């Protein structure tokens, strides 16, 4: 069914759940898995006096390096073949564009992403990378909610 799966990761709890879901699926299907991390730049602050954008960028690159090691090890432990790719957002290429391009370059037949499930003003202000990918993708996109696999709250006693 799916032989090449791309999973978008950013180090958050939500993206780790998405990675676990993609890893499980790749393991069961014998699919190749590529984890994709995007270094997101924040250009709105680049013109502020005294602001050095390289500090934030370098931290994001370091986070990507740490994720590469951690997630690659998890793939090896599960016997899943694949690799890790990194892209860098710019004023021309935002994160959803990078994810979709990475999927095309990998010749993926499924994209897996985490979603925070934000609504209302939070969604309006923060936007949704997952939503934009779903709307623009020509591939199936599997969304893993941040609460997926989480422990359920105990039932109140009567």
Image (cartoon, rainbow, N blue to C red):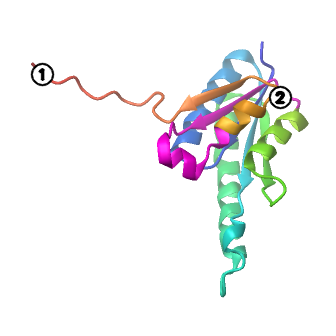
Q: Nearer the viewer, residue 8 or 83?
A: 8
Vertical side of 9 occupied by 60: above or below: below
Quarter of the figure with the C terminus: top left
Identity of the residue drawn at 48% across and 42% down? 120
Q: Nearer the viewer, residue 112 or 72?
A: 112
Location of residue 102 by image quarter: top right
- Position of residue 65 relative to residue 9, above or below, is below
Q: Is residue 18 above or below residue 42?
A: above
First in residue order: circle 1 vs circle 2: 2
Residues in magenta? Answer: 107-130
Q: Is residue 64 left or right of residue 120?
A: right
Residue, x 46% and y 27% (percent of image)? 149
Tell me residue 33's x, y (percent).
76, 31
Residue 111 image point, x, y percent: 73, 30
| Label 1 crowd bin: few (<14), some (14–19), many (20+), radius 10 Å | few
- In magenta segment, residue 117: yes
Secondary structure category for the residue under label 1: loop
Instruction: Give the residue number, with chain letter if any, for mark 1.
Output: 157
Question: Where 65 falls versus 130 (above or below)?
Answer: below
Asked whether disc 1 touches disc 2, contact meaning CB atoms under 8 Å apart, the reply is no
Q: Nearer the viewer, residue 81 or 113?
A: 113
Please state the horizontal and vertical placement of residue 84, each as a whole percent of the image. Answer: 77, 44
Residue, disc 2: 108
Describe the element under mark 2 as helix, strand or loop: loop
Q: Position of residue 17 (x, y in %)?
A: 55, 35
Look at the image and say whether residue 42 sits in the magenta stretch: no
């Amino acid at each position: 069914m799916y032989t090449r799966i791309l999973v978008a990761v950013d180090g958050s709890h939500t993206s780790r759940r998405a990675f676990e879901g993609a890893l499980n699926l790749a393991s069961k299907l014998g699919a190749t898995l590529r984890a994709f991390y995007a270094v997101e730049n924040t250009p709105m602050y680049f013109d502020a006096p005294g602001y050095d954008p390289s500090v934030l960028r370098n931290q994001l690159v370091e986070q990507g390096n740490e994720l590469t090691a951690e997630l690659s090890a998890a793939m090896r432990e599960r016997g899943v073949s694949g690799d890790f790719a990194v892209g860098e957002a710019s004023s021309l290429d935002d994160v959803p564009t990078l994810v979709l391009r990475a999927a095309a370059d990998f010749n993926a037949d499924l994209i897996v992403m985490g979603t925070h499930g934000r609504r209302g003003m939070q969604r309006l202000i923060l936007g949704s990378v997952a939503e934009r990918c779903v709307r623009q993708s020509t591939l199936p996109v599997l969304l893993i909610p941040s609460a997926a696999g989480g422990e359920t709250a105990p039932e109140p006693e009567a």
